[in-house]
């Protein structure tokens, strides 16, 4: 009993440190605010008029939503991806500047140290995702409290998985400099091939899709796990799914479990 | 500490009984002094009130109360080291490990740090285990272990080590140059000490007495130098600080390389 309380205190300590550090990190916060503004207000508003087709002379949206509404859930995922994967820097920092030793000589088991860190990183990333939710009315998205609650839960699980992924990256990347390049080469391709900024038009059959988009692109979109995360959030926030609704949740939970297990194995080996 | 078996509960206890101060800073420099202590207390599973009381006590011990809400990044090297010592003591360990706690610090801070540690050692049940390059700093220790090239070459209390390996010296200042030459002629084992001084081995009382009787009119100052730990270290390893010798060797090597390239 006593041991459980002490372990929880330790977990809370590690978590709290991540949160405190994040509030001190101006640059990250500015990124978290400016990124959705750029994507939604500039790209979103700019492309909004082009997101429609002409069917028998009648102008209508390709899917029953405006481009801003369509883009909105994806920008949440983008913000979470950046913050989560950037979390690897915190792990590298701990390793390079000696703080890790302080934790490793403590009585905390390694599993709890890692769990606390990942929970902390996931909390920060979820908050950065929630910053986008504040912009909902600019994107013409009306949200009920239920929707927000479900979305936040999904966002947290997604952030947990991606933060674990950041830890896995940190174990393989030796320097800060290398990481900056690395994170962009991972995040942006994943984002662009997640059907985030263009739909795989659900009105068309599979065969016609391949005519509209080259097959390799459709293939990339379909194997990208982020596609299903974006799709799950779209289902919750604008009630639009391109895939079977259950898949998104499955993929998000699956990523969280898989990446965390790999992160544990990596961390135990260090 | 005893031997800690592999099962989790005794390991928790064993780790709790240890305090560690690393050679390089392991503080989080984005947090304040207080937050660093708070983190340590949480990770060691301390209850809130106990945490607060102990944090205040250890901060007072290292005289950092006025800095408790400052970000550690703004701290000097000495302040960081003091905070680290405070942190290592927060959970009341029985054994405190210090890896070169005074390396790279100014003389004033070094004195302060040893003052805290001595106080703790005397007032509480605390074993302090420290490694250092400044051997005179461990004069007050119970047991000293001299390690050279990874092997223990001497072990014992400072007094025992001095008695066994140290030697007593007679430091003297001859009246003039002629006297100095005369003494050097009479005692070939005399070593020059500065420009005008001499040092004689003084372990043999009879010969020292004889020397003093013979030369007492030609000396302006005479002083017995008791064996120091530094001299023990010197006589055991045959050289001064290893670092310095290694540095010279490396410098020579570098010079050789440069020469080769030219």
Image (tube, coloured by chain):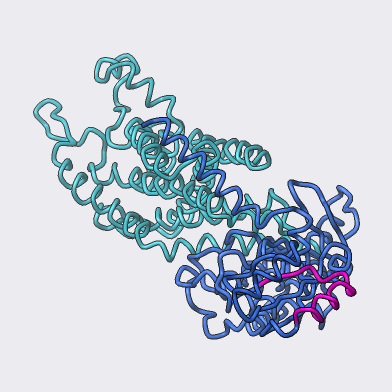
Q: Is residue B136 left or right of residue A208?
A: right
- Between A16 and B244, which is closer to the camera in this rendering? B244
Image point 13% across, 29% down: which residue?
A: A54
Left-right relation of B96 to B194: right
A238 shown above or below B196 = above
Q: Which chain is blue?
A: B
Quadrant where the C terminus of chain A is found in the figure: top right
Q: Residue at x 34, y 30 (%)?
A: A193
As for residue B33 lying within the magenta part, the answer is: no
A35 vs A231, nearest the viewer: A35
Corner quadrant of residue B115: bottom right
Query: What quarter of the picture does the N terminus of chain A occupy?
Result: bottom right
Q: Which region of the structure is painted magenta? A: B198-215
Q: Position of residue B232 (x, y in %)?
A: 78, 63
- Relative to residue A121, is residue B158 drawn left or right? right
Establish if B8 lies above or below B30. above
Q: Residue at x 75, y 60 (%)?
A: B233
């Amino acid at each position: 009993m006593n041991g459980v309380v002490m372990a929880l205190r330790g977990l809370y300590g590690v978590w709290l440190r991540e949160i405190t550090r994040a509030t001190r990190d101006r640059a990250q916060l500015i990124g978290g605010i400016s990124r959705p503004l750029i994507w939604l207000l500039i790209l979103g508003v700019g492309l909004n008029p082009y997101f429609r087709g002409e069917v028998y002379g009648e102008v209508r949206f390709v899917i029953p939503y405006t481009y801003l509404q369509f883009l909105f859930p994806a920008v949440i995922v983008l913000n979470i991806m950046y913050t989560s994967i950037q979390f690897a820097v915190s792990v590298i920092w701990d390793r390079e500047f000696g703080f890790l030793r302080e934790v490793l000589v403590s009585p905390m088991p390694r599993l709890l140290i890692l769990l606390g860190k990942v929970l902390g990183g996931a909390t920060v990333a979820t908050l950065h995702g929630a910053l986008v939710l504040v912009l909902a009315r600019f994107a013409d998205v009306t949200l009920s409290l239920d929707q927000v609650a479900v979305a936040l839960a999904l966002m947290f699980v997604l952030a947990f998985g991606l933060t674990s992924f950041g830890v896995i990256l940190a174990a393989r990347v030796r320097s800060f400099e290398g990481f900056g390049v690395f994170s962009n080469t991972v995040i942006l391709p994943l984002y662009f091939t997640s059907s985030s900024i263009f739909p795989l038009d659900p009105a068309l059959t599979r065969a016609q899709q391949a005519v509209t988009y080259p097959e390799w692109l459709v293939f990339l979109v379909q194997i990208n796990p982020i596609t299903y995360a974006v799709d799950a959030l779209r289902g919750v926030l604008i009630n639009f799914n391109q895939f079977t609704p259950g898949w998104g949740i499955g993929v998000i939970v699956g990523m969280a479990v898989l990446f965390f297990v790999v992160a544990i194995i990596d961390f135990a080996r260090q | 500490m005893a031997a800690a078996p592999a099962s989790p509960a005794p390991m928790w206890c064993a780790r709790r009984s240890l305090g560690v101060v690393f050679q390089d800073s392991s503080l989080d420099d984005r947090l304040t002094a207080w937050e660093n202590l708070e983190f340590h207390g949480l990770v060691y599973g301390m209850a809130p009130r106990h945490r607060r009381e102990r944090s205040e006590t250890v901060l007072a011990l290292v005289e950092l109360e006025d800095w408790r809400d400052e970000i550690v990044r703004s701290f000097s090297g000495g302040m960081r080291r003091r905070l680290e010592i405070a942190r290592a003591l927060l959970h009341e360990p029985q054994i405190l490990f210090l890896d070169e706690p005074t390396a790279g610090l100014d003389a004033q801070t070094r004195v302060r740090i040893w003052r805290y540690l001595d106080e703790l050692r005397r007032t509480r049940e605390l074993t302090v285990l420290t490694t250092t390059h400044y051997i005179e700093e461990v004069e007050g220790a119970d047991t000293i272990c001299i390690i050279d090239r990874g092997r223990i070459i001497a072990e014992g209390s400072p007094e025992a080590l001095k008695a066994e390996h140290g030697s007593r010296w007679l430091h003297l200042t001859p009246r003039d140059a002629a006297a100095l030459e005369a003494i050097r002629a009479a005692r070939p084992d005399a070593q020059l000490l500065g420009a005008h001084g001499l040092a004689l081995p003084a372990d043999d009382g009879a010969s020292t007495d004889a020397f003093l009787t013979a030369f007492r009119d030609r000396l302006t100052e005479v002083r017995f130098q008791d064996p120091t730990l530094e001299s023990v270290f010197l006589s055991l390893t045959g050289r001064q600080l290893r670092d310095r010798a290694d540095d010279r060797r490396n410098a020579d090597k570098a010079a050789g390389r440069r020469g080769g390239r030219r």
